Amino acid sequence: MIQRTNYYKKLSANYSRTGLVSEDMKAKLIKLGEDLITKIEPTLPEINDTYSLEMIEQENKDWWPSHCEALRQGRGDILTGEYREDLIYLCQDGPYQGLEQQKEREQHWWALIAQPGVTMCWPIVMFSGEHTFFEWKCVDDETNETIAKGSVTWVRRGHRGGCYLKTEQLTFYRDVFAPENLLKLIKTA
């Protein structure tokens, strides 16, 4: 039988449940997220001897905690910045192509999963080259009710390439569209 593992043991922060990340680390990860979105090159970089899959996988591991913190803080500006302009996004409401098609729908999702009194957690995250797979859930801080959950695969060519393919299955148990007061909490570019 395969031993269970802590998926965060070699990452800079643990987002598998609430209360594991210090305020100082949260601030550092937001700054990192802001910096990383400036590194995406206009042309998707080639995988070769100078930019190998091993390097890309390490960059994805370094990026991952900043992505989690950006979601917890409702930083839609960082989250959108992680995508390439030619993003392909496959999900039950999609497919979406480019940044404009998914913007309206994803803003509602972000508002619901980052709302006050709810904490998003990623109990499972796995990396393989430019692929990052994760499962997530949003838990009501008061009732411990799961309000939403999903599984996602990102194809991210490291810091230089950003995410060019995202597939997602998500289920919302309590809400589907965010009310206006929650939408106002999402920072946009």
Image (cartoon, rainbow, N blue to C red):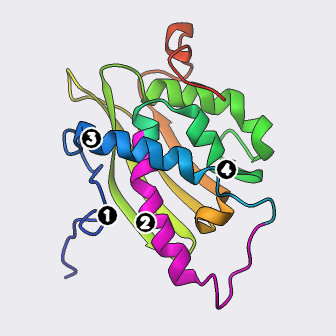
Q: Look at the image and tell me whether residue 15 can be seen.
A: yes
| Residue under the image location 54 percent in, 30 percent down | 109
Q: Which residue is mark 4?
A: 83
Residue, disc 1: 11
Amino acid bearing label 3? Asp
Label located before the other in sequence (4 or 1): 1
Position of 126 with respect to 176 (left or right) is left
Residue 92: x and y in percent read 64, 43
The residue indicated by pointer 2 is 61
At 38% from the left and 61% from the top, the residue drawn is 125
Res 150 visible:
no
- Which quadrant is the N terminus positioned in? bottom left
Element type at marker 4?
strand
Where is mark 3, residue-wise? 24
Residue 100 image point, x, y percent: 79, 36
Which secondary structure, mark 1?
loop
Measure the C-alpha gap from mark 4 to mark 3: 26 Å
Q: Is residue 52 left or right of residue 19?
A: right
Magenta residues (range): 44-69
